[in-house]
Image (spheres, helix red, strand yellow):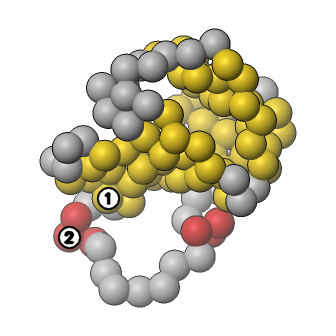
Amino acid sequence: MKNNENNMSDNSIKKEILNIGSLLDYQEGSVVSRALINKDVGTVTLFSFDKGEGLSEHTAPFDALVYVFDGEAEITISKEDFRLKSGQMIIMPANEPHALRALEKFKMMLIMIKS
């Protein structure tokens, strides 16, 4: 798995209307991420996953919301599987083990609240 990251600096944030689907592309055999907001109190990051790619089980010390805006994914939280399609979201509670797997190419927004 390749992991490519493209961050927007806080200085590049502008008041403009953006099309979420066009902010990052799919890359074959890869997970691509792009941080839109990275603050001490939380982050907003977009991800695209090629089919079959994913993130292995891990935990985070903060609550996180995943919003799938293209494709389909399986998200496992504390050994319970959830199948999400475009337009659906789920909250991953702090300190609970979770993992993600692309059932087909999918894109998601991850919003993590740190306070």
Which element type, helix, strand or loop, lies under badge 1?
strand
For the view shown, which residue lies furthest in the left direction?
40
Q: Position of residue 88 (x, y in %)?
A: 69, 53
Q: Amino acid at mark 1?
A: Ile
Instruction: Measuring from the top left, give residue 10's x and y in whole percent.
Output: 22, 64
Quarter of the image that includes the N terminus: top right
Asked if the residues shown at circle 2 and circle 1 are in contact, with their CB atoms under 8 angstroms apart, the answer is no
Residue 64 in view: yes
Side of 37 relative to 59 (left or right): left
In the rendered view of the protein, which quadrant contains the C terminus? top left
> Toward the viewer: 112 or 78?
78
Give the SS element for disc 2.
Answer: helix
Q: Which residue is mark 2?
A: 11
Residue at figure coordinates x 44%, y 31% from the top left: 93
Horizontal side of residue 14 vs 3, given as left or right:
left
Q: Which residue is mark 1?
A: 37
Under mark 2, the amino acid is Asn
Question: What x and y, as percent, mark residue 13?
Answer: 29, 73
Q: Is residue 40 left or right of residue 85?
A: left
Mark 1 surroundings: few (<14), some (14-19) or many (≥20) residues within 10 A: some
Q: What label does residue 81 carry, if any?
A: none
Residue at x-position 78% and y-position 49%: 85
